[in-house]
Amino acid sequence: GDKARVRHILISPEIDKNDEKEAFVFASALKDSCKNIISFKKYVTKYSEDYQTSNIGGDLGWIIPDQYPIQEFNTALNYIKKNECSPPINTSYGYHLLWLEKIKPGGKANINNHWPKIEAIALNNKKMEWYNSWIKKTKKEKYIKIVN
């Protein structure tokens, strides 16, 4: 399937409904301030409460949206344009702002879109064939005795 390169800012509200509203308003203000990836990363470092990703610009890496544990991301990624910040997304963790960096189309590999990977697979296959034939030949020529 398709993969998306995504970053996020997590704003966790307190339990009080008023605090949740404040977190939403704050996240909305941050969204309006995120004009490009540089400003987004700056706000991640300053405000995100996801301590695993806050030091790396909120980078979640390449994700497969419909298999990502936070299902709200899958829905939101259908509406976000590339290089754009999402509106606040409410999850059980708090409010997220997502930045969609890149999209890798899924489907069957083809030469136009996947040439470097196809080339690497073919090269690795040739190396393994050579290595296996070398092992077979060397086993016949060399004797190894294992003593306990």
Image: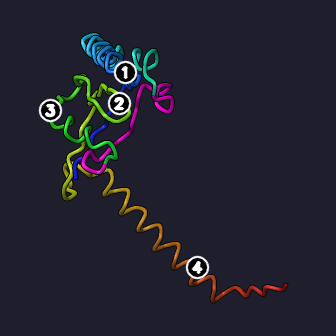
Tags 4 and 2 in contact by the CB under 8 Å rule? Answer: no
Tags 4 and 3 in contact by the CB under 8 Å rule? Answer: no
Query: x%, y% of residue 114?
Result: 26, 51
Q: Earlier in the sequence, mark 4 or mark 2?
A: 2
Q: Which mark is residue 16?
A: 1
Q: Earlier in the sequence, mark 1 or mark 4?
A: 1
**Nearest-to-viewer mark from 2 and 1:** 1
The quadrant of the image that shows the C terminus is bottom right
Q: Earlier in the sequence, mark 1 or mark 3?
A: 1
Tell me where the magenta segment starts and ends, as one range. Answer: 50-67
Q: Which mark is residue 7?
A: 2
At label 2, the amino acid type is Arg
Cα distance, mark 2 to mark 1?
27 Å
Q: Which mark is residue 135?
A: 4
Q: Residues within 10 Å of mark 2 (few under 14, many from 20)?
A: many
Tags 1 and 4 in contact by the CB under 8 Å rule? Answer: no
Cα distance, mark 4 to mark 2?
46 Å
Cα distance, mark 4 to mark 3?
54 Å
